[in-house]
Amino acid sequence: MKLSNRVLNRTLLARQHLLERCALTVPQLCDHLIGLQAQDMLPPFVAAWSRLADFDPETVSAGLDDRSLVRITLMRGTIHLVTPPDALRIAPHIQPELEKVPFRKGFNYGAMVGLDPEEVRANGEKVLGDIPTPAAELRAHAAALYPDRDPGAVLQTWLYQLPVLQTPPRGRWGDSSRPVWSRVEPWLGAPLDPDYPLEELLLRYLRAFGPATTMDMQTWSKLTGMKPAVDRLGDRVRTYIDDRGRTLYDAADAELADPDLPAPVRLLGWYDNALLSHQDRSRIIADGAAPPLRAFANQVSAILVDGYLAGVYKVFPKGDTARLRISPRTAWTPADRAAVEAEAHSLLGFLEPDRTPSVEIIAPGADLRP
């Protein structure tokens, strides 16, 4: 059966809870989406706000404090907000790939080349210990142990080599303080689970992001061995064909969305999972409409109109005012424009309730900076 791009778009939006806000809790949403992108403080909050009805950001803060939610480096080597079971069972899949990074010539201009990886790891285990440690303190230890190396590169190496997570206060609502790092097992009081099958993880990926190709799965996870793992799922998956003749896999009991379903305007956080979890992003980013991914590093975020990326925005809180500036990437109808403005005002009310909101739609392609 051949699936149109429109079917893939609406199915992705439905599975991402971007067609209609749902009543899931934050941990339930994290489990379904296999984590929320959390490289910075705000993105997981915007991701949850765009997907959950009556979302209270303090539930995330409380979850981090009671350890029912954690911030950990997982897919694509980036921080995700996940539940403890996922931290313990996904990390063993990701860790071997992370550990390859620091001793390559391209890592920090070869800063770690020539050092014994096992010795560096052993020192990192001693330094981190069982107690959460601020990044500045870890960097000081790195400078003392390796005076002829960049201490920042040594610290980053430890964070790749060892299963670690960020502890509060960073990640709480409104708190972008410096990272405090802990090894995973002492913080969660449980061992890593190396026996969680890759195929089970991929089946969950399909339920949240499918139908998808094996290259989509690899792009999302940065893992290899996708095809053998999918084959092990047997009749738990079904196959489709996309417009370009590629094989798409999906959970056998998962439903496809009606391509005629309306898709409301959504404002996403930077690096939102829905945008970065496929090799071929055309199901949500039309050809030529995507901003460079490096733009997201500047806290530029995506706007979906009729289900596709149709503009970018950035929030500028200053003094008594919060300005949300928008740059369209496609032609908008008056109804589109009104819907974008309404959703932007709602987002400002969530992010900056104590500031006067200002929504500005600027010329397409213009600089978002005021």
Image (spheres, rainbow, N blue to C red):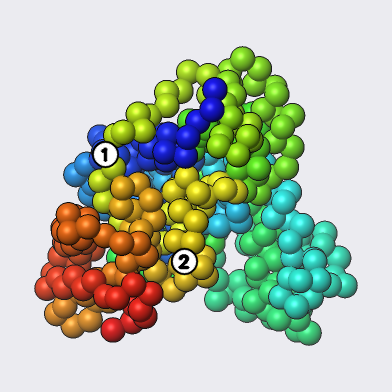
Depicted 86 relative to depicted 326: above or below: above
Residue beneath disc 1:
262
Q: Secondary structure at mark 1?
A: loop
- Residue 256 sits in quarter: top left
Q: Secondary structure at mark 2?
A: loop
Measuring from the top left, give residue 54's x and y in whole percent.
19, 44
Gap between marks 1 and 2, in whole Å?
A: 24 Å
Specify the label residue 5 is tagged with: none
Depicted 160 relative to depicted 141: above or below: above
Measuring from the top left, give residue 140's x and y in whole percent.
63, 79
| Residue at position x 33%, y 82% in the image | 369
Within-10-Å neighbours for mark 2: few <14, some 14–19, many 20+? some
Total marks in image:
2
| Residue at position x 38%, y 37% in the image | 10
**Looking at the image, can residue 69 be seen?**
yes
Identify which residue, 268 or 341, lies in the foreground: 341
Closer to the N terminus: mark 1 or mark 2? 1
Measuring from the top left, give residue 103's x and y in whole percent.
80, 66
| Residue at position x 64%, y 62% in the image | 159
**Looking at the image, can residue 194 be seen?**
no
Q: Is residue 111 left or right of residue 187?
A: right
Residue beneath disc 2:
291
- Residue 44 sits in quarter: bottom left
Within-10-Å neighbours for mark 1: few <14, some 14–19, many 20+? few
Identify which residue, 362 or 227, lies in the foreground: 362
Q: Is residue 167 left or right of residue 350?
A: right
| Residue at position x 54%, y 43% in the image | 87
- Label 1 is placed on what type of residue? Pro
- Label 2 is placed on what type of residue? Pro
Measuring from the top left, give residue 351's x and y in whole percent.
23, 63
The N terminus sits in image quarter: top right
Q: Is residue 245 left or right of residue 68?
A: right
